Amino acid sequence: MSTTSIDTETSTAETDSIHADPADTIPTTDTATGENDEGDADNGDGDAVADSAKEPRSRRLSWSGLVVFGVLPLIVVTLAAGAGYLKFRDGAIRGSDLARTGSVQAATEATVAMLSYNPNNVDAALHSAQDRLTGSFRESYRALVDDVVIPGAKQKKIAAAATVPAAASITATDTHATVMVFVNQSTIVGNDAPTASASAVEVTLDKVNQRWLVSGFEPK
């Protein structure tokens, strides 16, 4: 008798549960609002994260701007200055090379001209050599050849021939140079046998009107 009563109550409870008003299962406004508040809190946290993420980016952009507008122009200026220096250095090297080459050639040719003559051409040869000289040295050389060398060559039948087996630049700029010249000279006096001599001479040159001219001649 009691068992039948329990079963009937259970069935009634299940039936009431099945036919319950759906509204009873909908969350209340307070519950929904609470969830929305939590959502807003989450959104707030998201905004904070986004803001914090933007800050490094802003810094990166600032550094990028510094690189673009600061470092790159500096690099360009540095490269331009480096290129200018290299061009200047290249030009200076080329100029020095030309000065060395030109002065060595001029010193060699002048030395041979100054020390080579024979009784028949001594006037013309040594006067022509003076065109390769400049300054006070030219005046000294002219006085020497006119007063001593030319008269002696004619009187004693002296002939001299000079050669330059080697010459080397000591210093050279666009307007001034010194050259070491090694000289071999053969001299014949009258009917005597030739005599040979070897010497080294430091030749100083100045560039006058685009020509290298001898301004000093010092045996070593």
Image (cartoon, grey):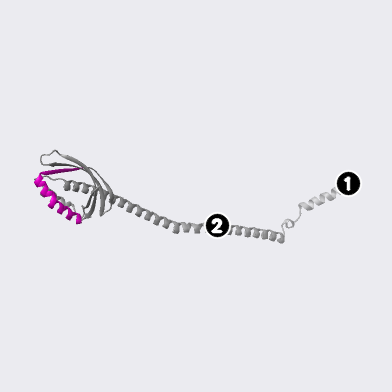
Please report whichever mark, 1 or 2, sits nearer to the chain's N-terminal start: 1
* Residue sitting nearer the eye, 41 or 138: 138
Callout 2, which amino acid? Pro
Is residue 88 among the parts visible in the rendering?
A: yes
| Residue 49 coordinates in the image, percent (x, y) | 60, 57
Q: Is residue 11 magenta?
A: no
Crowd class of label 1 (few under 14; some 14 to 19; many from 20; radius 10 Å): few
Crowd class of label 2 (few under 14; some 14 to 19; many from 20; radius 10 Å): few
Task: Please count the marks in the image.
Answer: 2
Residue sitting at 82 percent across and 49 percent down? 11
Which region shows up in magenta?
Answer: 136-164
Measure the alpha-carbon separation of dots 1 and 2. 75 Å
Q: Say the numbered circle drawn on residue 3.
A: 1
| Residue 17 coordinates in the image, percent (x, y) | 78, 52
* Residue sitting nearer the eye, 23 or 204: 204
Callout 1, which amino acid? Thr
* Residue sitting nearer the eye, 124 or 18: 124
- Reading the image, the residue beneath label 2 is 56
Horizontal arrangement in the rendering, residue 28 relative to residue 206 (left or right):
right
Horizontal arrangement in the rendering, residue 98 relative to residue 17 (left or right):
left
